[in-house]
Amino acid sequence: MNHAYVDASWREEQADQGRGGWGLVLLGSGELPLRMGGQLSAPDNNAAEMRAVLEAVRSAPPGEPLSIYSDNWAVLNSLSKGRGTPSLWSLREEVLALVLERGITLRMKYVPRHRRHMRSAHDLANAARLGQHTGPLTHDAAEVSLELREGSQLARVALRRPGERVTAEVPLDPLDPLPPSAQALLAAVSLGTQGETLRIRRVSKLARALWENPQRTLLPAAQAELIQAREQAEGLGVVVEFE
């Protein structure tokens, strides 16, 4: 089963026409997410949302089931129940024709925007509307997850990059001036390789705040540790993103 999270961004520029962006996150079995986005002209936001669905069908593997998640009820009702505004009719027919041509079994489902991959699709759509990217984001990226158990002196760091999975048990030093969550974050960042983007989830608000601004801690030793970790990452071209 393949899963696609889609969203759009749109701003009116003149009557019945505006500039939009679509974004999608496509997940396949055992694969890292594929993130894509593009800019388009569209009569309204619903049309931009339907274009995101079309791109998801176009990008998914042929001959396999595909679940598409959206927070737009107009698009969901148009595809699932044949109802919708006139601006969606031609795009709807294009989506259904492509589904048939590629042998895809399509399922549509509502998901609120605050869900993890929906937030990513929304950010991709906004960036595409602003002309910041188009097409697949092909730069090297790794997915990182942090796990800290209360009372434990170990943190678990799980990293996935194309062709590799890494799991590390990181000891937490009670004498370290950094809080345990920040220690785990620095351990995760240290796994980054040259020019890689690390998309890190399950990060505490405190650890993220300290990474983004080391001056938030009043302890000189903690500031020095954070600044050194950031400089090492920047020297390797490692980009840290939070989800």
Image: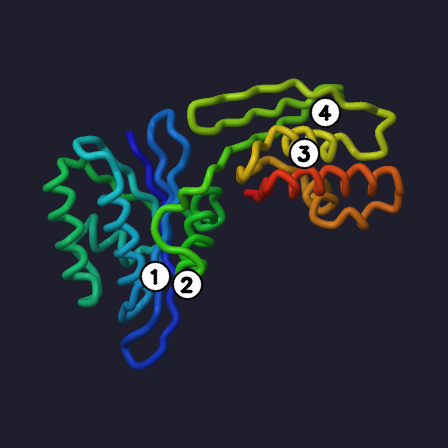
Quadrant of the rendering where the C terminus is positioned:
top right
Residue picked out by circle 4? 150
Task: Give the mark nearest the N terminus, 2 or 1.
Answer: 1
Q: Which is more foreground, mark 2 or mark 3?
A: 2
The residue shown at (56%, 25%) is: 158
For the residue carrying disc 3, how many other residues have a C-alpha within 10 Å: few (<14), some (14-19), or many (20+)?
many
Name the spot of residue 54 as percent of width and height, x first. 23, 51
The three-letter amino acid code for the residue at tag 2 is: Gly
Q: Looking at the image, is 172 positioned above or below residue 122?
A: above
Task: Give the mark nearest the N terminus, 4 or 3.
Answer: 4
The one of 38 and 147 positioned closer to us in this rendering: 38
Residue picked out by circle 2? 131
**Under tag 3, what secondary structure?**
helix
The three-letter amino acid code for the residue at tag 1 is: Gln
The three-letter amino acid code for the residue at tag 4 is: Glu
Q: Of the numbered discs in the image, which one, if any, rests on residue 185?
A: 3
**Under tag 4, what secondary structure?**
loop
Q: Image check: 131 left or right of 230?
A: left
Residue picked out by circle 1? 39
Task: Give the mark nearest the N terminus, 3 or 1.
Answer: 1
Q: Quadrant of residue 28?
A: top left
